[in-house]
Each structure stands twice: as C-alpha cells, then as structure tokens.
Image: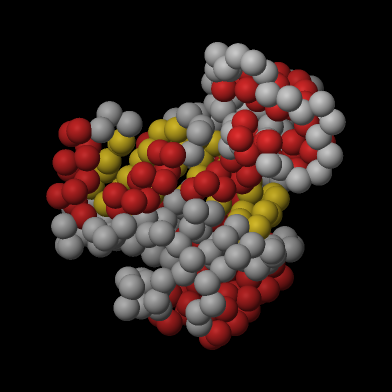
Amino acid sequence: MDVGSLSTAAPSRLTESDASSAPGPRPGLVSPAVGFASDAERLDWLIATLGEPFCRKLGLYRVPDDLVLSVVIPAYNEKASIHEILRRVRAVPLRKEIIIVDDCSTDGTRDILREMAKADGDLKVVFHERNQGKGAALRTGFREATGQIVIVQDADLEYDPAQYPELIRPIVEDQADVVYGSRFIGETHRVLYFWHSLANKFLTLLSNAFTNLNLTDMEVCYKVFRREVIQGIELKSDRFGFEPEVTAKVARFTFPARGERPERKCRVYELPVSYHGRTYAEGKHIGVKDGFQALWCIIRYAIAD
C-alpha cells in the first residue's frame, strides 16, 4: 500500500480537545471559528497545526478511506464480557467488519450472540457445533474475513481495542505485512503469574531460535496480518498451538514476484500493547497442558508443515 495514496478522509484517534491539551510547543494553535464538516477536515487541521512529526508521535495519521479492518473474535464461555468487548471494538474509529466465532459455548454466550446477530447488522456470527479450540475458531474467522487487514481479538477484556490504530499503522504505511503486539516492551500490564511469564518468555525464545525472528511475545493475542498473508497460510492447530504455528509459518511466508516487484519475505513488526490479564477465577482458559502443546508445536512446525 503506497503511503502517497493515503486518503484524507480517515477518522482520527485524537479529538480537537485532545490536541489542545497535547504536550509540546504549539505555535499558532487556534481553533477555527466554525466546526469541522468531517473527520477528514479535523485531521487535516490537526496535522497542519501540530506538524506531521508530532502527530505521528501521537499516533495520528491518515488511513485510506476504503480500508476495512476485519476483527476476528473467537469466543468460548464469555457471557460476562461479550457485550463490553463488542462495545469497545465498535468504538474504534475505523471501518470494520466484526466476525465472532462461538466455539460451542455452554454458559449462555451463544444465546446472546444469536440475539445480537438478529439485531446488529455489523456482526457476522459463526457457531461451531462442537468445541474445537481457539485455533479452530480462528481458522473459521480468517476464512470469513474480507478486509484488507485482519486482527485477532480475544473475547475477554485482557486487551484494549483502542490500540488498533497504532497496531495497523505499520501495514497501512507499507512498512510491515504482519504486526505482533508485545506485553513486555513498555505498556502497562496487570501483575499476575510469575511462572506463566517465565514460560511465555521461554517459549518465545525457543520459537525465535527456530524462526530466526526476534520477537519478545510470541504468545500475545494481538496479531495483525495483511489478509493475503493469513489466508495464504494453511493452519492446522486447533487449540493454543495456533500461536507458535502461525509464527513459524509467517516467518517462512514469501510474497511471489508480481510485475516488477521481486519475490520477498514477509516483513514482521512488533509494537507494545497494554495487558489486563485475568486470573483463573475470572475465567482464564489457558493451562499447563497448553504450554506443553505450544512446545510441541514449536518443534513440529519448525521441521514439518
């Protein structure tokens, strides 16, 4: 996607009132006497007033007006959080298609989603008739995606959808093809389980040794893909083995030569994300067995597809 083709009609994460309280020098920062006719006008005014370098630090940039972000949400027994996570996803000022895959929930989540699907035209809901696991739910969701960019969103409240604009920017600006979030490089996170954190870092280190990537958080939920990448990968893991499997296959993914563009490897970026983890009493699903499965998948997908 060429940066020069970016549209001025994109919404911004920063409002006019936010800009007036932003730090740093603001010579000549005067709000116009009349209101803005559109978000595009507000965006242009902010960039012209604050300067593009400063706006980039604020995460303020132009998005193509035809860009659609596909948000894929695997859900299993998330009755307590499904309404709120959808409210937060919808609040993100980007054009989106929201795809929810219910993996045979038994706590009433399915009934809630059926009612939502009838009432809300912006939801695409798919129901699994038997529980298959997060990886299987994501495979279903990826097949349904039609947006240029696809992001994974858990149905709990551990990750903040307000970070979507930051996460997609490297792809929008044609610097990356895949973006990983990381809970370990600068954002806030809830302090929880030491051994989980240690296991995560070990699995990430082992994955990096096989893929030759230098990720800090291979197990993170927030993974963002160009649609042609994620739909060009054959995924097999049904449960949490999805994380090491998709990482191994992204590391090997190659874009074919097209016209004057030569064949090239997939470009991977990593950005900090906040994390508000759950305890097991609050509904956390992943366990020790999943850690051993991740270990097996790292080795398996390093040597075989």
Q: How is the image coloured?
A: secondary structure
Q: Is residue 264 visible?
A: no
Camera-nearest residue between 141 and 17? 17
Query: In this image, 301 relative to 109: left or right?
Result: right
Query: In this image, 4 relative to 200: left or right?
Result: right
Q: Position of residue 43 (x, y in %)?
A: 65, 25
Q: Position of residue 231 (x, y in %)?
A: 50, 40
Task: Identify the residue shown where x is 22% and y is 46%.
Answer: 113
Q: What is the quadrant of the N terminus in the image?
A: top right
Q: Position of residue 87 (x, y in %)?
A: 36, 44
Q: Is residue 114 visible?
A: yes
120 shown above or below 259: below
Query: Residue 64: which quarter of the image?
Result: top right
Q: Position of residue 172 (x, y in %)?
A: 66, 33
Q: What is the quadrant of the C terminus in the image?
A: bottom right
Task: Identify the residue shown where x is 27% and y is 56%.
Answer: 103
5 shown above or below 296: above
Task: Identify the residue shown where x is 57% and y is 75%.
Answer: 200
Query: In this image, 301 relative to 293: left or right?
Result: right
Task: Identify the residue shown where x is 76% and y is 28%.
Answer: 29
Q: Residue furthest bottom?
A: 195
Camera-nearest residue between 176 and 207? 176
Query: Residue 146: which quarter of the image?
Result: top left
Query: In this image, 172 relative to 304: left or right?
Result: right
Count of picture labels: 0
Camera-nearest residue between 52 and 78? 52
